[in-house]
Image (cartoon, rainbow, N blue to C red):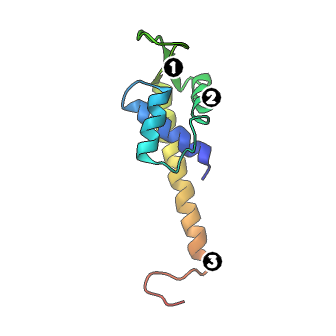
Amino acid sequence: MNQTHLLDLALLGLLEEGAAHGLDLYHRLLLKDPGLISSNAPIYPRLHHLAARKLIERLPCLEPSRGKPRQLYQITDAGKKARLDLKTKLGQDLENKVAQLTRHGLPRNGASS
């Protein structure tokens, strides 16, 4: 499982809950899974990547801001489909990894080592 895929899945999932600013997404990710990100630096390249693939879109931000204007992100229909596809792929990858580990003679529940 790739950390980038997990981050994309998390970002798309959060945006399915509603449009948000990058910093808001960062704080929500920290609350839900502090281990997924270590700084807000990886968030913005992933948001730009998802936008370039038309999985999310940038909306005009009507809020007044100090300094640099804030971007508001929203998931697209293509992003909703990609999220389901990615969720399925990651689930299959996890199942395959578990099957691979259990085929290599790891102790099963109740078995002594």
Image position of 67 with respect to 5: above or below: above
| Label 3 – label 2 distance at C-alpha | 37 Å
Disc ID at residue 49? 2
Q: Which residue is mark 1?
A: 57
3 vs 1, front mark: 1
Q: Residue at x 51, y 20 (%)?
A: 57
Picture coordinates of residue 71, whole percent (x, y): 51, 18
| 1 relative position to 72: left or right | right
**Can you give x and y, in whole percent of width and height, for residue 49 in the image?**
62, 28
Instruction: Compute the Cα span from label 1 to label 2.
Output: 11 Å
In screen coordinates, is 100 left or right of 111?
A: right
Q: How many marks?
A: 3
Q: Which residue is mark 3?
A: 104
Asked where in the image residue 93 lies, by quadrant, the reply is bottom right
The amino acid sitting under disc 2 is His
Q: Is residue 16 above or below residue 32?
A: above
* On screen, residue 41 above or below 88: above
Residue 102: percent from left, percent from top: 56, 74
102 is higher (above) or lower (below) than 18: below
